[in-house]
Image (spheres, rainbow, N blue to C red):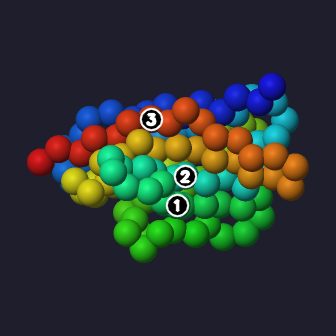
């Protein structure tokens, strides 16, 4: 049974930074594409950033230049470094792993940006 667990969320003032982590059990991490999604209250879940097993990362326009996605396959862990946080970044952030044979989601971690 694969488990995906996010951590690192919390309350931060606007302009601050947070780093989210996504830890995966099992042996799927290194062969899966890693993505971060977020869902704000009353809104649909949206893609924030994605990094394939090989290739360049992709960022939503709303976070480009502020967020950085990365992965450490040796640690089975992915990261989302979030800088210059804005009020509109407030949401539950979800980690997503996609491979040809499976999709896995974490339970989410709350990020709240205050003024």
Q: How far apart are marks 3 and 2 (CA)?
A: 11 Å
Mark 3 or mark 2: name the one nearer the start of the chain: 2
Q: How far apart are marks 2 and 1 (CA)?
A: 6 Å
Q: In which quarter of the image is the N terminus?
A: top right
Does residue 47 appear in this view? yes
- Secondary structure at badge 2 equals strand
Mark 3 or mark 1: name the one nearer the start of the chain: 1
In percent of width and height, residue 73 lies at 74, 44
- Secondary structure at badge 1 equals strand
Furthest residue toward front: 42
Please give the name of the residue rendered at 26% of the width and 35% of the height, measured from the top-left corner. Answer: 11
Please give the name of the residue rendered at 87% of the width and 49% of the height, measured from the top-left corner. Answer: 101
Q: In this view, does 44 lie above or below 112?
A: below
Viewer-proximal residue, 26 or 96? 96
Mark 2 or mark 1: name the one nearer the start of the chain: 2
Residue 99 shown left or right of residue 38 in the figure: right
- Contact, mark 2 vs mark 1 (Cβ under 8 Å): yes
Residue tagged 3: 109
Q: How crowded is mark 2: few (under 14 residues within 10 Å), some or many (20 or more)?
A: many
Residue tagged 2: 36
Residue 88 shown left or right of residue 103 in the figure: left
Does residue 19 appear in this view? no
Residue tagged 1: 47
- Contact, mark 3 vs mark 1 (Cβ under 8 Å): no
In percent of width and height, residue 7 lies at 49, 31
Q: Distance between the residues labelled 3 and 1?
A: 15 Å
- Secondary structure at badge 3 equals strand
């Amino acid at each position: 049974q694969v488990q995906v667990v996010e951590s690192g969320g919390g309350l931060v003032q606007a302009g601050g930074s947070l780093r989210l982590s996504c830890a995966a059990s099992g042996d799927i991490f290194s062969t899966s594409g890693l993505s971060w999604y977020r869902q704000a209250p009353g809104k649909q879940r949206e893609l924030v950033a994605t990094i394939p097993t090989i290739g360049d990362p992709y960022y939503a326009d709303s976070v480009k230049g502020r967020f950085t996605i990365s992965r450490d396959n040796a640690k089975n862990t992915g990261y989302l470094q979030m800088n210059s946080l804005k009020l509109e970044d407030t949401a539950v952030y979800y980690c997503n792993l996609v491979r040809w044979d499976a999709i896995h989601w974490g339970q989410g971690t709350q990020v709240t940006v205050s003024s």
